[in-house]
Image (tube, rainbow, N blue to C red):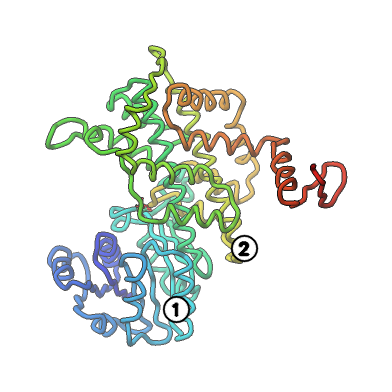
Amino acid sequence: MQLGVIGLGTMGANLARNAARNGATVAVYNRTKEKMEEFMKTHGKEGRFIPCTTLTDILKAIKPPRAILIMVKAGESVDEVIHDLLSLQPNDILIDGGNSHYKDTERRQRELTKKGIHFLGMGVSGGERGALLGPSLMPGGSKEAYDHLEPLLQKMAAPLDYARDDTQQHQKCVTYIGPGGSGHFVKTVHNGIEYGLMQLIAEAYHLLRDIGKKSNAESAKIFAEWNTDPHLSSYLLEITGKILRKRDLETKQNLIDNIKDIASQKGTGKWVVEAALRYGVAIPTIGAALDARIISNQKELRVRRSHEIPFTANIRKGEDLTEDLRIALLLATICTYAQGFDLLERASAEERWNLRLTEIARIWRGGCIIRSVLLKTFQDIFAGKNDEKIRLGAAFSETAQKRWRAVVAVGAQHGIPLPTFGASLSYFDALRTAHLPANLTAAQRDFFGAHGYERIDTPGIFHTKWE
Ligand code: 6PG
């Protein structure tokens, strides 16, 4: 198998190495020649690489039908590369492995299809380590192109790490997602879930630190213990334990204490919220996580207000929240995944992508950032296993709910923001409330705008002259 890779940044370079290690001959190109030469110097002996200094070279280096993976910054750079690949032939395959917007992917696909060129928009998750050793791959678009590439993608993808079931351990984290921009859409939703789960863990750390008065080492131990929990174990919990233990080489203190409380974003978090609005799906945990990042960037304002509006909470000594937090984290995590899958299901119906949620849950069980044991449960539920559904439902027992509510209440009482714990709890409560106050909202709409309302006793739409 031959593959061209355009863009040798961290992800591109590691995917090129991954492909070569798995037997492919890889033609490599980077806009700045020095980077390509540096790549060849450092990794050239790891496999069969063909160094290319122009885009024409890369097209000459591999045999038709040529498969070329584009790993450049999402946005205009992708269009520029496609535009500059002048001598592409019908049946050649272009794969965009960046975090592109799914609507851009669909536009590019339409343009390339006219020329007989296959286009795959492929979500790639797992960061730089995953790209090299085995990512989770979410390719969508031309099925013909996927079939051609499948043997290589199967080799490159991660195995199912979180495989409780031994019979599935040989499976790989790649599947054909669906037509159009569905591959990139699924990656965007993956990132939304990633935002939610990361923020939930951050809030748990905040409570452990400021209410539980835990040292970093103590919190690290708690996260490590939670990571052995058969329902909670996840990659993000695993790395959190490691992060909290890490020493700063300069100061010898815990590195975490020297990191500014500002979290950035590259765009997929915003896109998932926009998509939720477009398809009319509630994803409050993910939305709250995005807002939390935005507010974290208002550092100056927060510092000023912390002096202007002080609040001293009465923290009860020796209050141990750990067990409540473990349960709250589990339930809110379930809500976060549920919101992501709900969005996938709705978008799939509207776009006619025919997404297989069972397969998506499966390929997220290894390689990617949101991998966890819970995804096996979701996979089983989507496959129709009713006992798993009952088991997941049982997690929301009244006792467990009380613990979750206690966590949110402690945050409120002590002035600690818990946007994702709170949003998840309200989401859960709203979905289990038979009689919401939306009757009043409907009446208000009718009062000021004659928008009509439905009655509980008679079908139809009604309007009242309120005054
Ligand atoms: C992954 C990650 C990866 C990257 C995000 C970060 O699945 O490997 O999601 O794609 O970390 O782009 O996104 P933010 O900059 O928005 O946090």
Instruction: Indicate the quadrant where residue 302 lies.
Output: top left
Residue for point 55% across, 45% down: 338
Q: Residue furthest front?
A: 467
Mark 2 CB near ligand 1 (8 Å cut) = no
Residue indicated by mark 2? 350
The local secondary structure at tag 1 comes to: strand
The local secondary structure at tag 2 comes to: helix
- Indicate the quadrant containing the C terminus: top left, top right, bottom left or bottom right: top right
Query: In the rendered image of this protein, does residue 399 appear above or below residue 440?
Result: above
First-in-chain label (2 vs 1): 1
Instruction: Indicate the quadrant where residue 124 lies.
Output: bottom left
Amino acid found under the numbered disc labelled 1: His
* Cα distance in 3D space between marks 2 and 1: 24 Å
Amino acid found under the numbered disc labelled 2: Glu
Q: Residue furthest right?
A: 458
217 or 467, which is in the foreground? 467
Residue indicated by mark 1? 118
Mark 2 or mark 1, which is nearer to you? 2
Q: Position of residue 54 (x, y in %)?
A: 22, 80
